[in-house]
Image (cartoon, rainbow, N blue to C red):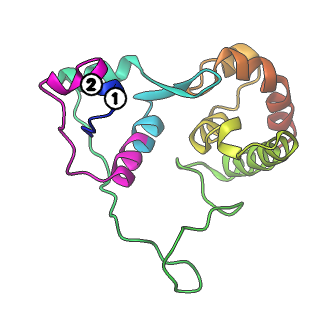
Amino acid sequence: RGKATDKVTQYRHQSLSTFGIGADVSEAQWRAVLRQLIALGHVRTEGEYNTLELTASAREVLRGDVSLLLRVASDTPKRGKSGKTGKVTRGKDKPPPITLDDEGTERFTALKAWRAEVAKEHGLPAYVIFHDATLAEMARAKPTSLDEMSTISGVGAKKLEAYGREILRVLALA
């Protein structure tokens, strides 16, 4: 967004022609754009620290070969059931980020329940284990092997090793 931090100055990023482009867009809106790019498969999270990485399909978008339509997020706070504005309630009833059939939705729900247990055991936020978009893609693809699972965006080698067999078990039972 064009913030002049110490690292930006150290690497002279402020002198790039693209520096500051998008400063008129809020952080919440940028996060919404990133979530959509991840869901569309143009960006993926990689590794233990969930760093962002462009996929091959993103290159087509950047070159202008493929056009992209994204939903515009508003900065207006959402209202919960109480009618009060504030933080959006997230939980077990949150729908998957992609459209799934009934069986896929059941698998997604089972994966979220598994993730909640694992996160609680390790004292971590659930999204650190896997993002909803990754769980939704697992529910849609229903991988039956570690090789198949390794092709899903957001599943790096470490997470595959740590959780792969458990996820296959959850998917087989769902």
Numbered disc 1: secondary structure: helix
- Residue with the mark numbered 1: 6
In this picture, which residue range is highlighted in magenta? Answer: 9-34
Left or right of 117: which side holds 97? left
**Considering only vertical position in the picture, is 131 above or below 61?**
below
Q: In which quarter of the image is residue 73?
A: bottom left
Most foreground residue, 111 or 80? 80
- Residue with the mark numbered 2: 9
Left or right of 149: which side holds 20? left
Residue at 60% in and 36% down: 134
Left or right of 128: which side holds 43? left
Q: How crowded is mark 1: few (under 14 residues within 10 Å), some or many (20 or more)?
A: few
Q: Does the magenta stretch include residue 33?
A: yes
**Considering only vertical position in the picture, is 79 above or below 104?**
below
- Residue kind at label 2, given as amino acid type: Thr
Q: Quadrant of residue 6?
A: top left
Residue 98 percent coordinates (x, y): 52, 47
- Residue kind at label 1, given as amino acid type: Asp
Residue at 68% in and 51% down: 105
Numbered disc 2: secondary structure: helix
